[in-house]
Amino acid sequence: MLEKGKWKAKWIVWKFKGEAKEENLIEKKEVEGNLLLNEGINAIWTLVAGGTETAYSNSNARIGVGDSNASADPTQTGLLGVNQYYKGMDEGYPTYGSGQKIVFRSTFGTNEANFAWNEVTVDNGAASGKNLNRKVISLGTKTSDQTWIIQLEIMLS
């Protein structure tokens, strides 16, 4: 008997001129996939087993963006870019507990992360935070007159 599990990740970026309002939407970009990082996998299993680990909660989880386009490798422990910026969760995120998924979302304002977004990750906090994943993809270059919202949806089935 063959057992299968499926991990599906979808990144969505909404780009706005100025404030994040519907009438200011410039572009919506959706990208599927990412690579789980070993440290993130180990953090998940520690949390599942009730061990001591920092939860990927609203007060800890962050989405990080960087400018490196180096290939993703499971042994990496975060972003590789010279320019990196980590942002905490929007109010009410992450969402979880239904649909076999978790959804992380962060809003990067006009004065945050103004550089080429070539890599993304989710971690569970500053300093010793464990990166769940890493995706290398050119999402564009954010400028100081833009607000970008980025969301990661992870579904298990």
Image (cartoon, helix red, strand yellow):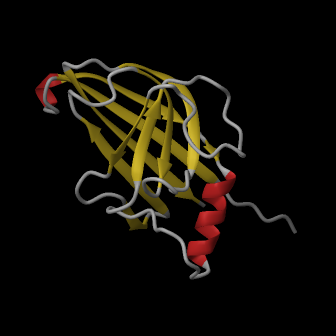
Q: Quadrant of residue 48?
A: bottom right
Q: Viewer-proximal residue, 11 or 3?
A: 11
Q: Is residue 7 left or right of residue 127?
A: right
Q: Is residue 105 left or right of residue 39?
A: left
- In the rendered image, the quadrant that contains the C terminus is bottom right
Residue 133, compared with residue 144, is above or below; it is: below
Q: Viewer-proximal residue, 90 or 32?
A: 90
**Position of residue 33 measured from the top left corner of the image (x, y, whole percent):** 58, 39
- Residue located at (27% from left, 40% from top): 107
- Residue located at (38% from left, 20% from top): 115
Numbered label tally: 0
**Position of residue 60 measured from the top left corner of the image (x, y, whole percent):** 38, 60
Residue 14, compared with residue 55, is above or below; it is: above
- Residue located at (20% from left, 27% from top): 110
**Position of residue 151 measured from the top left corner of the image (x, y, whole percent):** 38, 43
Residue extending furthest toward the front: 127
Q: Is residue 23 left or right of residue 34?
A: left
**Position of residue 68 measured from the top left corner of the image (x, y, whole percent):** 55, 24
